[in-house]
Image: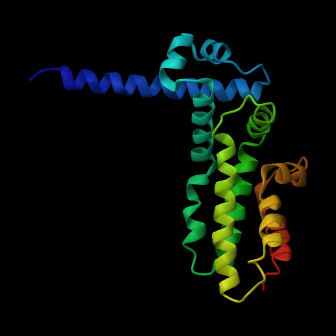
Amino acid sequence: MSPRPYQLQQRRVGMDGTRARIVSAARTVLVGGARFSIDAVARHAGVARLTVYDRFGTREGLLEAVFDDLAQSGGLTNLPEAFTQPDPIDGLERFVAIFCGFYSKHRLILRRLNALAVLGRGAAGHGDRNPRRLEGLTVLLARIAASGRAEAGSADVLHAVYALTSFAFFDEFAGAEADPAVVTPRAVALVREIAHLR
């Protein structure tokens, strides 16, 4: 039997390991406050600059991979739970809790990613994630309005809840605390009040 399939598998594992090391290095550079560049990430990861480009294509591709890694480790992959709750108000509360936990876990790096986006140096797709949050809230609030338990279907309520579930609001609202066990119930209470939930 040829050893080639085993060697190819080892190579894939090595490539995945290199990719993970680069993403980890990018996170460290972002949190450390140094100027974010491919060179800085490559140095920190102990790889050649070309290796970073080979794995991610562009700086924006690397930042997208960082955000995907944050989403995975920060619990955003649990968002489907919000849409499968039998009670749509429970679904909305779960949605808010998931985002509060995510923002709390990755607060420093999200500040840096948002700053890069404002400066036009962030990932092009990073901004695409906010409309997805708006779409999710639209679905949940429409379900609540259809249940007759709130005036949650209005555009004003949607935009207010959208603002309350943004990182910018969370970062300001949480102050120095940022403990999701403390912040989440307060954020949920605000959302309930704004949406006139009953």
- The N terminus sits in image quarter: top left
In this view, 53 is above or below 134? above
Tell me which residue sits at (81%, 34%) in the image. Answer: 115
- Residue 176 placed where, x, y %? 90, 46
- The C terminus sits in image quarter: bottom right
Relative to the observer, which residue lies in front, 103 or 177? Answer: 103
Relative to the observer, which residue lies in front, 68 or 28? Answer: 68
Q: Residue furthest left?
A: 1
Tell me which residue sits at (73%, 87%) in the image. Answer: 149
Tell me which residue sits at (23%, 25%) in the image. Answer: 6
Image quadrant where residue 28 sits: top right
Q: Is residue 173 visible?
A: yes
- Residue 17 placed where, x, y %? 46, 26
Q: Residue furthest front?
A: 155
Tell me which residue sits at (68%, 80%) in the image. Answer: 144
- Residue 66 placed where, x, y %? 61, 34
Q: Residue furthest bottom?
A: 148
| Horizontal side of residue 163 vs 52, given as left or right | right
Q: Is residue 47 visible?
A: no
Color scheme of the displayed model: rainbow
Tally of numbered tags: 0
Image quadrant where residue 151 sits: bottom right
In this view, 73 is above or below 42? below
